[in-house]
Amino acid sequence: MSQNGEPSPSIVLIMGKTGVGKSTFIKAATGLDITTGHHLDSCTAIPQFYPVPDTTTFLVDTPGFDDPSLSDTSVLQSIASCLADISEGLLFPNLTAQISGIIFMQAINEPRMTGTMMRNLAILRLLVGEGNMEHCVLVTTKWGLEESDVAERREAELIQTKDYWGWFLAEGAGIERYGDSHESALVIMRAATRRGGFVPRLMQEYAVDGMELSATAAGRAIDGDVARARGRNEQELEKLRAEYKSAMDEDDAESTAALNAVWLRMEESLKVLDQETEQLRATRSEAQKQLDGFEEAAARTPHADDDVASSTRLGDNGDEVSISTSTGSSDDGLANLATKNNGRQIARSRTAKDKKTGCEAETGIALVWSVHCFGRCRCNECPHVRGHDAGRSQSDGIGGGGMSGRQEP
C-alpha cells in the first residue's frame, strides 16, 4: 500500500531471449493487442509496461541479451534505467511501486542449450542477485510446437542440470509451463508475485548505491565481453596492417582497396565498442544529466493540435528526438511527447480530451507502453478508467504481495 492509501503497483519483469514468446505471454495475460515478433528483428527495443486488467500488476516486456538490433550493453542500460526509474518513483507519481517478481522464459522446442541461452541465464543470475531467486519463476513456452515426450525430456534436463535451471531451482526459484492461455498466464503471475516486493541486485547497485553500470555484477560481465571483443579486433587490425603494407609494397591496387575496405569496417566496429565502454562507465546520475538535456529540448517543442502528428528532429546535442502527439479517440486520447535516451523511452504528457466521451485525463507514467496510459480519468465512462482504475481490484489475486579517431593505414 502506498503512503496515500492507494494500492502499490506490482511490477513483474518478463525476461528471456528474443523470440521466446514474451510478447505473446503478455498479450494473453493483458488482453492487449500488442506486437509479437515473428521476424529476425525484435519488436521490443526498450522495456515496455502493460497493465493487467483487474489487478495492480504491470508486466514489463524487456529486450533479450541476444537482440539483433541492440548490443548487450544497450539492453543492460535500458533495463537498469527502467529499474532506476522505478526505484526513484518516476513512473508512478505518489505511488510506491515495487518489483514483485521476474519471469524468465525459455522455449521448450529449442533442441539444445545454446551459448545465447546460457548467456541470458548468466545475466539473469547477476541481475537478480543470489539471495533473491525465490522471486523468480522459470517458464517453458511453446509446448504445442513439440512432441510431448521430447518436451518432457528437455524439461527434465533443464531441471536436473545445475548449469541450466538446476542452480536457480535449488536457490528457491519456481518453475511453470505456459499453456498458451489467459488462465495459464494468471497462474504464472501469481507464482511470480507470491513473495511480495524485493530489490533486484542491479537495482540496488545502480539506482541505490550509485555505481557505474560497469561496476555492477551484470555490468562487469558485459564489460568483460566488450573488452575481449575489442582485443580481438585490435589483433585483427594488426594483421590487416601487415597485409596492407605488403600489398602497398607490391603495388597491388586491387588488394590494397579490398584491405582498406575491411580496415574501415573494423574501425567502425572499434568505435562502437568504444561507445559501449563509455556507456558502461556512466553512473545513474550521469545518465540522468544526459536525459535532462533531452527533456529540455523536447519541452521547447510545441504540441500539435491536430489528430495525429509525428516528426523527428535533432536535439541540442545532435541526438535524434522523436516527437509524437495524438488527440484521437479512445486509446489515442492522450497527447504524449516522447524522447529516447540510451534505450529508454520517456513520456511527457498534457491533459487531453477524449472525443467520444468528453473525458479529460492526464498521464502519470514516464515509460510508454503500447497506446495505454496510467491515468486518472475524471469520469466513469471513459475507456481509460477501465484499464487503470479497475486495476485497484484484487479479484485475480495478483499483485497483492505489496506489491575514436584513428587514421586509415
Image (cartoon, grey):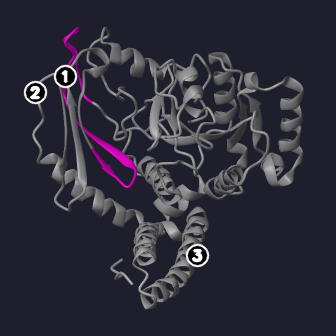
Q: Which residues are magenta?
A: 339-362
Q: Are marks 1 and 3 in contact (CB under 8 Å)?
A: no
- Up the image or down, 116 lies above or below 153; here it is below
Q: Earlier in the sequence, mark 2 or mark 1?
A: 2
- Camera-side mark, 3 or 2: 3
Please indicate, yes or no, whether residue 39 appears anywhere in the rendered image.
Answer: yes
- Up the image or down, 83 lies above or below 305; here it is below
Residue 286, numbered circle: none
Horizontal and vertical percent position of residue 247: 47, 84
Secondary element under disc 2, as helix, strand or loop, is loop
| Residue denoted by label 2 | 305
| Residue denoted by label 1 | 327
Q: What is the quadrant of residue 254 in the picture? A: bottom left
Magenta span contains residue 210: no
Magenta span contains residue 340: yes
Work out how far the residue at label 1 is from the one at label 3, CA to CA, in angstroms: 51 Å
